[in-house]
Image: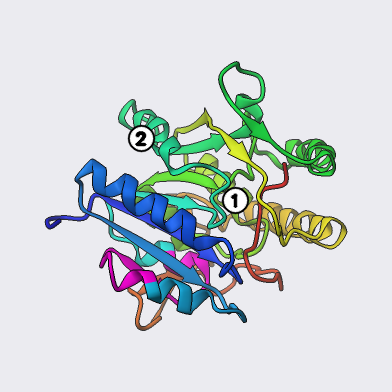
């Protein structure tokens, strides 16, 4: 398969050796059937298990798979596809759901996000979750409603599709690698006037989740506060409306492509990007 890369699929992976291989195989099978040039970027942010070895063992067969050792934001900045999917490595959302998000972008959306909340209200969709996650999601949604994120019922589903130019814009100013990663992207997208389409998708809870209910819930609330503060300080404004003291500094990040960051954006001391989906 040759030609301009049409699809970038970015999978954040932190200690995913036991879960990532089936999803990678499903992705490569699905994309090869489509017949469009693609790349799969597995972004390993400091795994201590054999995640890298597992990915390398498969990458030698389909050359489209690449392993990057970096935070997930840098993985998205390294992507070159015309359309860029961010998906959780556990495979909670089947890769086949990509077709629905693709259609939403074709219909004019800048960002298309998978939604378990919408799917749970519709016939024909399967949402398999745990009770404690559902209760936590309800509480978190009430907090998110206070954060200026408007009209989005599921911010945390790890299945989001971006136009290339939109992804480049959003990840240029994003600063959070923890559980507030999705919140920040959607907040910035709304602040910049991008059209976000929320699409129902099938989803199932995967065993061996790394989400720690008490500790990580507090971390997300803290990151939400950081997002609101950055927003109030104007760090997420459109380029034409940056405050005068907003200066961008180019930072070299070999071997990935160069990206720009804001040196004064507040970044919380969050951990690795693990399972961010709460439901």
Q: Is 279 in the magenta?
A: no
SS label for mark 2: helix
Question: Between 7 and 152, which is closer to the camera in this rendering?
Answer: 7
* Quadrant occupied by the C terminus: top right
Image coordinates of residue 118 in percent, x first then y, are 62, 25
Q: Earlier in the sequence, mark 1 or mark 2?
A: 2
Q: Which residues are magenta?
A: 58-75
SS label for mark 1: helix
Question: Between 154 and 47, which is closer to the camera in this rendering?
Answer: 47
Image coordinates of residue 82 in percent, x first then y, are 27, 49
Q: Is 60 in the magenta?
A: yes
Q: Residues within 10 Å of mark 2 (few under 14, many from 20)?
A: some
Q: Is residue 198 visible?
A: yes
On the picture, is 178 further left or further right than 9? right
Question: Between 123 and 192, which is closer to the camera in this rendering?
Answer: 123
Direction top: furthest residue: 123
On the picture, is 255 further left or further right than 215? left
Residue located at (59% from left, 38% from top) = 203
- Frontmost of labels 1 and 2 is 2
Residue 67 sits in which quadrant? bottom left
Residue located at (41% from left, 30% from top) = 100
Disc tally is 2
Identify the residue position indicated by label 2 in the image: 102
On the picture, is 187 further left or further right than 248? right
Q: Which mark is residue 182?
A: 1
Image coordinates of residue 227 in percent, x first then y, are 67, 55
């Amino acid at each position: 398969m040759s030609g301009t890369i049409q699809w970038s699929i970015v999978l954040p992976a932190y200690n995913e050796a036991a879960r990532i291989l089936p999803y990678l195989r499903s992705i490569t099978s699905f994309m090869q059937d489509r017949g469009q040039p693609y790349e799969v970027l597995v972004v390993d942010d400091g795994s201590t298990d054999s995640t890298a070895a597992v990915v390398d063992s498969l990458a030698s067969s389909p050359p489209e798979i690449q392993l990057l050792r970096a935070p997930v934001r840098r993985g998205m900045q390294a992507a070159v596809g015309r359309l860029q999917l961010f998906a959780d490595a556990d495979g909670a959302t089947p890769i086949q759901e990509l077709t629905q998000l693709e259609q939403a972008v074709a219909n004019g959306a800048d960002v298309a996000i998978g939604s378990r909340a919408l799917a749970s209200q519709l016939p024909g969709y399967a949402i398999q979750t745990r009770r404690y996650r559902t209760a936590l999601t309800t509480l978190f949604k009430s907090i998110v409603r206070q954060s200026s994120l408007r009209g989005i019922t599921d911010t945390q589903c790890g299945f989001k599709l971006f136009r290339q130019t939109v992804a480049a814009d959003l990840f240029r100013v994003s600063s959070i690698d923890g559980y507030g990663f999705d919140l920040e992207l959607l907040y910035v997208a709304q602040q910049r006037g991008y059209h976000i389409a929320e699409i129902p998708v099938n989803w199932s809870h995967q065993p061996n989740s790394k989400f720690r209910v008490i500790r990580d819930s507090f971390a997300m609330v803290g990151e939400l506060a950081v997002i609101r503060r950055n927003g109030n300080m104007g760090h997420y404004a459109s380029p034409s409306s940056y405050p005068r003291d907003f200066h961008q500094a180019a930072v070299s990040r070999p071997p990935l492509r160069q990206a720009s960051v804001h040196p004064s954006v507040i970044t919380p001391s969050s951990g690795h990007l693990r399972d961010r989906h709460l439901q």
